Amino acid sequence: MRLFPVTLRSLARTLAAATLLSAAAAPVWAQKIVYGFSASTAFANAFVAANEGIFKKHGLDVEMKLVPNSATTPAALMAGSLQIATPTAPNTMQAVEQGLDLVVLAGGGYYTKGMEDVAIMVQPNSPIKTAKDFEGKRVSTPGLNAFLHVLFRKWMAENGGDYKKVTFTENAFAQSVDVLRNGQVDGILAVQPFLARALETNAGRVVAYYIAALEGEVQSGWHVANRKWADANPKQVAAFRAAIEEASALAAKDPAVVRKANLVYIPFPAEVQAKFPDPKFRPVITPDVVQNWNKIMMDQDMLKKPIDPAKLIYK
């Protein structure tokens, strides 16, 4: 009888087809990428890539992991507990100067003149009106020597103030409005939604949208890896870059995908996130971006010498 051998052949074909389909559906690379991110729209092109299935489309298995303090991510990258992360530019470049072999794979958000979602705030009845007025005062920042702190010092220097005469204290975003209201500090570096909260509750007033007042563009976010991991996984690096570029293009075309992704990865309700401005993304980091940060940091004595863009930007 021929029925039994034909059935076996059919079964073999079916199993082969199922195997091929299963392989096609699985990630191209089995190794998972643990992506450590801060809850900031500066990294929302990665949120879009995850939420819209773009990472999977490019064969990547990416685990999104919220990290409370981005300053801890350089060490986590070197230890291998994270494969890609979002340390700020100052954190990254100081870590590289200290000997950590980190590389920038792709870019996130950037600021241009007029983007008013970051402010220096004071109490409503405060006499402070100018950069110079902050001399001798206490200002709260969410991270010492991090993005917001460094750019506030730049704004002060460019507007007649001496930031070396300011006492900076570190407080989490969620605590900043309370420490201002209670008079523990004279000013806070505020971002949305805390900025809006302070205005709505009359806890503070804006002295300046200080990043918006700076000339030129400033990269606010980038995606960083350990060079050893990147060298060992070139196809994953290429796929990650392609996914970030595709997500950035989609975000520019349809900002609604950014708002949808933010709701998944940023722990604030929709009514709060409605106050977030639409971010702008620069997915490809060029040497001028690094040189701009070199100048900012050298001016503030944060680096002994400029970081070589050719070394920092992964090829």
Image (cartoon, grey):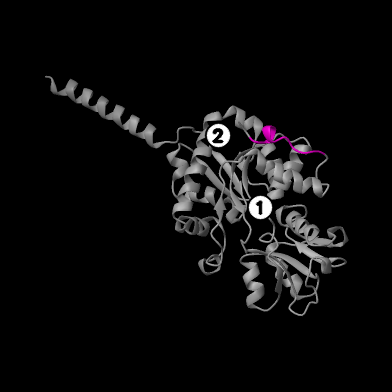
Checking the image for residue 62, the label placed there is none
> Viewer-proximal residue, 184 or 23?
184
Q: Which of the labelled discs sits on residue 216, or is there none?
A: 1
User: How many angstroms separate mark 1 from mark 2 (CA)?
Assistant: 30 Å
Q: How crowded is mark 2: few (under 14 residues within 10 Å), some or many (20 or more)?
A: many
- Name the amino acid, label 1: Gly
Label 1 environment density (alpha carbons within 10 Å; few <14, some 14–19, many ≥20): few
Helix, strand, or loop for circle 2? helix
Give the residues in magenta. Answer: 305-313
Instruction: Identify the residue shown where x is 66% and y is 61%.
Output: 212
What residue sits right under mark 2 in the picture?
237
Residue 241 place in picture, x, y as percent: 53, 38
**What kind of residue is marked 2?**
Val
Estimate the x, y position of residue 216 in percent, counting from the top left: 66, 52
The residue drawn where x is 72% and y is 59% is 142
Q: In which quarter of the image is the N terminus?
A: top left
Q: Is residue 90 magenta?
A: no
Q: Say which label, 1 or 2, has the lower sequence index.
A: 1
The local secondary structure at tag 1 comes to loop
Q: Is residue 244 left or right of residue 184?
A: left
